[in-house]
């Protein structure tokens, strides 16, 4: 793999922000995920090479942080908050509704690759729960009805 | 550096500044149990087994990271500390498979040892254990059982800090953490075997050793690795005249806590392909004979040759005692000046800037001290006495020079022993007391782990007997003093 | 009422520089440069401002631990990794008033003589990230950041560093590890970050809300800040209220404010005519309060301590009479087990164990032995690990068991039960 020219430029801008190359690892992995939607083993080795760190180190970091994907997720990646405040307000209803609608279980992707579903821990959207993060955007105060509307807008 | 005096369990101890509580306690003979701490590695502080109480500290403190200060008061045996150790043991065992009967670590496992010392309560865990991968081939002869791993990270730190290869890591998090190389890769450093030694539990085991022998059946004898001129201090683990494994032994100046894989696996010649009886050539056939017959045959072979025309070749892998006996014998019995040496000279010898030296001979320094000449300098001789072995190059040379190998003193069969007219079995370094002087000039002792195979006799003894036969029974080999 | 942190919240385009400047923003800078760094530290000490991330450590005192003239750079790290369940105040400050934070960063950096500040922002906060990134750019353009600020020869560079999904990175040394490009595993202490912090250099880590209070303190003076709050807990604090209240949200109130008023007056009480059952006053890791306690307690460090709980991060989770406390506890246990970094034995093994026991209790009932074991596991975890994540589960377990015994008792008689509330 290789960065697109645009991402390569972004990568080059990252390095001077830190006194070590290693420190640029998280932002570099974000760039990879922006480009490919997930972080493959090949990409991990590429990043290791770019930053003079070992592939094993990159692997430990990718597996530690839950937002880094090792496999592709759907075009619309639904992340349902399941922690207490949202759970008090019925996040399980939202999750069940999504499972039924999308015909997939947690940590699965629909056959057409359009949707994927997972649960996540507290999104700091407790006052506006139940909350779901779709890709990088928050959707709050959800009801099954609102979820249906969101799904309609997913094209 | 100034001395610090403080108290552990009511005992006063004086230590150098910078000493940790765990080190000071060891000095007093107080054992503070631990898993992740290893004196040769950085401090990780994750196992929490070495928690102690220090006065004026609000919480228990890990002894591995607590630096002693003047007047500090440490307690390692309070009821609260005992309870903490018990609880750490319980935590470590909840997801552990408890498969000691089939685990190779049994007998040298800290989970077992500490369980007996600090826990000994039945499990209160009724839930499903976290299941992980078993029998993972990590490469370099290292096998991993993820379920047995306690995530102490000693192996990771070893690879990073000692082997200087950042190739192992702890992936994922929580109780799903696992030790792993990068997916699809294997451990590739030349010291990988050490991760098996330092693994405090049965997670990392040696492919070479596992399932061969229960460790409590093994005897341990201190010795020196003959694999290269570093001469790492080792322990020979053996039973019934057989070596099962070599492990490094602490020598701060030579090898610290470590040894290389090449040296570690270099024990097999002790178990295999051994010469166990004297033998002679009869019409091109090898025939086992008694010592008496062998001596007689050798006597006949040299009866009509001026002995000063004989050449003697000693190997740089022989002990100092053997080398000195050879020197004495050559000078005083044969009265020949033709004393040469041969040595292990592999084509592409391994080496690095840590322990592995390019010279694969454990006692070259002593050979140099005795001023033996390289065999390449030999122009002609009427016959050769070869002690141990010849390098391929040296053998080619003497074959080209058509110098007959009259006598061979060898522990293992080789091209030399096959050509020699008379062959005497000798012990390996594992079967005799002796010394090697390493590349740094340190003289270290090998200890007799078990009796020589078959009828083997040391070079010293063998030459002493020969001396008696050749020049009368009154003479004594002087170098025998130290044997 | 005009307070400290939230005066611009609700204004149109409150996140922009023009609105910020129009509403008194960046007014502290002239005054800041007329003070010595030591003077700034003293002013903040006088204000009594305490760390708002959860630990409540006096801010000025923390700054004073930074050694000077070490020959190494000094770093300021802003902890914007807000992840404590029930807490969403920093997100508000980041999204709606990023310039206030930047002005605060300038003050804190000047006080500790740092020329590089990192904002560690949680990976999920996309809007916050974009807002703070835009604000830093605006501030650079206007010369509030960058080289030679206000021609005073003072330079400050601000870098935003995005996390990637790990609660533990809110722990200050885990945050440093993460910033250095590693897993967020807390470091053993000593050494402390003030001496050996980011890249081995002296470092101060402050929470977003702590930093955001600084422009007010410098502009208006420490004494003005002390107008609010109590003697020992001066100033105001943001409380994030969630759960069973009519108007959940962020509320800035003076410390010492009655929790009862927050719930019933500001948040409009418990909806549906339900009764209050329990309140978590300071984020999910603090000991829980019963309804009776919630009626009496005041929101300051000391009062909450009297009730055996803590102010924590100010995440107030309100639960009505229908909530099964065993269910609530299991939800949190799962959270902490999921977020344990896996380093220390008691936390790695203990959090998962607690979760599994509680899940079994919910599904098949319990015995007294299970509860005794839960207590013991919690005691065995608390205070035995590198960081306090294990304590963050131990405290809820012990307090829920103690304060809501009836809820736990129900499971003793129920075999093969269907949980009252859905496990998620």
Image (cartoon, coloured by chain):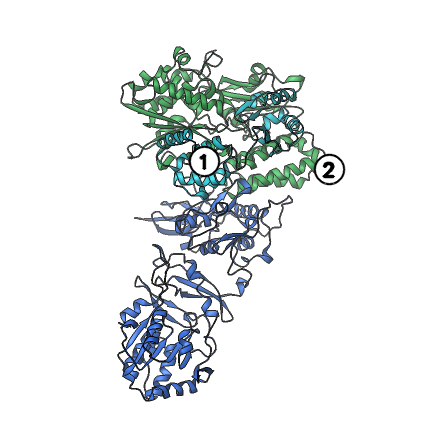
Q: Is residue B324 left or right of residue C168?
A: left
- Identify by letter the chain in cyan: A
The residue drawn where x is 62% and y is 48% is B123
| Residue A78 image position (x, y, % from top left) | 58, 28
Q: Chain of mark 1?
A: C
Q: Give the distance between the C-alpha atoms of the residues marked 1 and 2, in whole angstroms.
A: 41 Å
Could you tell me how many numbered marks the image carries? 2
Whether residue C289 can be seen here: no
- In the structure shown, which secondary structural element does the residue marked by tag 2 occupy? loop
Chain ID for label 2?
C
The residue that label 2 is drawn on is C416
Quarter occupied by residue B55: top left
What residue would you read off at disc 1?
C174
Mark 2: few/some/many CA within 10 Å (<14, 14-19, 20+): some
**Which dot marks residue C357?**
none
Task: State the residue in front, C339 or B58.
Answer: C339
- Where does the C terminus of chain B fall, quadrant-wise? bottom left
- Which circle's residue, 1 or 2, is located before the other in the chain? 1
Q: Position of residue C237 (x, y in %)?
A: 48, 20
* Residue B272 place in picture, x, y as percent: 48, 70
User: Is residue B60 visible to us here?
Assistant: yes
| Residue at the image position 29 percent from the left and 80 percent from the top | B381
Q: Quadrant of residue C331?
A: top right
Q: Residue furthest front?
A: B400
The local secondary structure at tag 1 comes to helix
Is B222 on the left-hand or right-hand side of A149? Answer: left
Which chain is depicted green? C
Residue beneath the point at 60% across and 46% down: B131
Dividing the picture into quadrants, the one containing residue B251 is: bottom left
User: What tint does the image give chain B?
Assistant: blue
Depth check: C318 or A129 in front? A129
């Amino acid at each position: 793999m290789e960065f697109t020219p645009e991402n390569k430029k972004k990568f080059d801008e990252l390095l001077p922000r830190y006194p070590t190359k290693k420190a640029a690892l998280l932002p570099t992995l974000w760039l990879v995920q922006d480009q490919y939607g997930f972080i493959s083993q090949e990409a991990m080795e590429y990043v290791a090479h770019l930053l003079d760190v070992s592939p094993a180190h990159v692997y430990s970091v990718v597996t530690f942080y839950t937002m880094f994907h090792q496999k592709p997720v759907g075009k619309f990646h639904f992340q349902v908050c399941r922690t207490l405040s949202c759970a008090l307000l019925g996040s399980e209803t939202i999750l069940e509704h999504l499972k039924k609608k999308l015909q997939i279980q947690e940590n699965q992707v629909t056959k057409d690759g359009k949707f994927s579903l997972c649960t996540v821990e507290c999104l700091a959207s407790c006052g506006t729960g139940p909350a779901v993060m779709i890709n990088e955007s928050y959707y709050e105060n959800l009801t099954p009805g609102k979820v249906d509307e969101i799904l309609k807008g997913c094209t | 550096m100034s001395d610090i005096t403080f108290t552990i369990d009511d005992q006063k101890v004086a230590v150098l500044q910078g000493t940790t509580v765990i080190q000071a306690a060891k000095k007093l003979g107080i054992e503070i149990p631990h898993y992740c701490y290893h004196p040769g590695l950085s401090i990780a502080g994750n196992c929490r087994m070495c928690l102690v109480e220090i006065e004026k500290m609000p919480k228990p403190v890990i002894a591995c990271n607590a630096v002693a200060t003047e007047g500090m008061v440490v307690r390692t045996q309070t009821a609260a500390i005992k309870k903490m150790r018990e609880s750490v043991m319980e935590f470590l065992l909840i997801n552990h498979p408890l498969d000691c009967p089939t685990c190779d670590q049994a007998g040298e496992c800290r989970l077992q040892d500490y369980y007996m010392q600090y826990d000994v309560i039945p499990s209160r865990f009724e839930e499903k254990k976290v299941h992980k991968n078993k029998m993972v081939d990590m490469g370099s002869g290292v096998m991993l059982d993820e379920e047995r791993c306690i995530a102490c990270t000693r192996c990771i730190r070893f690879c990073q800090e000692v082997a200087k290869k950042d190739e192992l890591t702890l992936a994922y998090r929580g109780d799903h953490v696992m030790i792993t190389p990068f997916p699809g890769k294997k451990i590739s450093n030349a010291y990988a075997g050490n991760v098996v030694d330092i693994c405090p539990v049965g997670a990392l085991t040696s492919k070479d050793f596992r399932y061969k022998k229960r460790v409590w059946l093994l005897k341990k004898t201190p010795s020196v690795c003959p694999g290269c001129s570093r001469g790492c201090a080792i322990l020979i683990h053996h039973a019934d005249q057989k070596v099962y494994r070599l492990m490094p032994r602490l020598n701060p100046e030579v090898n610290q806590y470590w040894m290389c894989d090449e040296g570690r696996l270099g024990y097999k010649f002790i178990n295999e392909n051994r010469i166990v009886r004297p033998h002679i050539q009869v019409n091109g056939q090898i025939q086992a004979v008694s010592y008496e017959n062998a001596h007689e045959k050798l006597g006949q072979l040299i009866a009509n040759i001026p002995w000063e025309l004989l050449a003697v070749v000693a190997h740089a892998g022989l002990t100092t005692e053997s080398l000195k006996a050879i020197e004495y014998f050559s000078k005083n019995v044969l009265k020949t000046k033709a004393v040469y040496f041969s040595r292990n000279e592999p084509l592409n010898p391994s080496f690095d800037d840590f322990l592995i030296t390019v010279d694969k001979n454990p006692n070259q320094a002593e050979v140099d001290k005795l001023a033996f000449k390289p065999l390449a300098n030999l122009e002609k001789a009427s016959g050769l006495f070869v002690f141990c072995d010849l390098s391929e190059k040296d053998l080619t040379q003497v074959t080209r020079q058509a110098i007959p190998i009259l006598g061979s003193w060898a522990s293992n069969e080789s091209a030399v022993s096959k050509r020699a007219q008379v062959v005497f079995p000798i012990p390996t370094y594992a079967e005799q007391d002796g010394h090697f002087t390493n590349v740094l000039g340190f003289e270290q002792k090998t200890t007799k782990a078990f009796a020589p195979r078959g009828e083997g006799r040391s070079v010293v003894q063998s030459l002493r007997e020969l001396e008696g036969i050749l020049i009368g029974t009154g003479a004594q080999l002087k170098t025998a003093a130290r044997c | 009422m005009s307070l400290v942190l939230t005066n611009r919240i609700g204004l149109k385009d409150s996140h922009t520089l023009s609105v910020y400047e129009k509403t008194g923003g960046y007014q502290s800078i002239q005054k800041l440069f007329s003070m010595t760094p030591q003077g700034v530290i003293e002013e903040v000490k006088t204000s009594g401002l305490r760390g708002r991330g959860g630990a409540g450590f006096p801010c000025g005192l923390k700054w004073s631990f930074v050694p000077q003239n070490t020959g190494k750079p000094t770093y300021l790290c802003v902890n914007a990794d807000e992840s404590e369940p029930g807490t969403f105040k920093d997100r508000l400050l980041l999204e709606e008033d990023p310039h206030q934070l930047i002005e605060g960063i300038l003050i804190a950096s000047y006080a500790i003589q740092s020329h590089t500040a990192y904002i560690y922002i949680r990976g999920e906060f996309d809007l916050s990230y974009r807002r703070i990134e835009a604000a830093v750019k605006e501030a650079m353009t206007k010369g509030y950041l960058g080289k030679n600020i206000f021609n005073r020869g003072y330079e400050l560079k601000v870098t935003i560093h995005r996390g990637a999904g790990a609660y533990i990175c809110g722990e200050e040394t885990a945050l440093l590890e993460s910033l250095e490009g590693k897993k967020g595993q807390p470091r053993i202490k000593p050494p402390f970050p003030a001496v050996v912090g980011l890249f081995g250099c002296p470092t101060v880590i402050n929470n977003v809300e702590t930093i955001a209070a600084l422009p007010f303190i410098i502009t208006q003076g420490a004494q003005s800040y002390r107008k609010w709050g109590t003697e020992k807990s001066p100033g105001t604090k943001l409380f994030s209220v969630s759960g069973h209240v009519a108007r959940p949200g962020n509320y800035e109130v003076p410390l010492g404010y009655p929790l009862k008023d927050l719930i019933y007056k500001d948040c409009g009480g418990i909806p549906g005519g339900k009764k209050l059952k329990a309140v978590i006053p300071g984020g999910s890791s603090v000991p829980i309060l019963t309804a009776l306690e919630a009626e009496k307690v005041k929101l300051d460090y000391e009062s909450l301590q009297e009730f055996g709980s803590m102010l924590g991060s100010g995440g107030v989770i309100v639960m009505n009479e229908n909530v099964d406390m065993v269910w609530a506890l299991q939800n949190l246990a799962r959270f902490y087990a999921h977020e344990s970094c896996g380093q220390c034995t008691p936390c790695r093994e203990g959090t998962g164990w607690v979760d599994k026991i509680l899940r079994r209790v919910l599904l098949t009932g319990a015995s007294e032995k299970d509860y005794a074991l839960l207590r013991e596991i919690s005691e065995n975890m608390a205070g035995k690990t590198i960081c306090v994540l294990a304590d963050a589960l131990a405290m809820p377990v012990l307090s829920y068991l103690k304060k809501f015994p009836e809820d736990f008792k129900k499971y003793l008689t129920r075999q093969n039960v269907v949980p009252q509330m859905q496990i998620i």
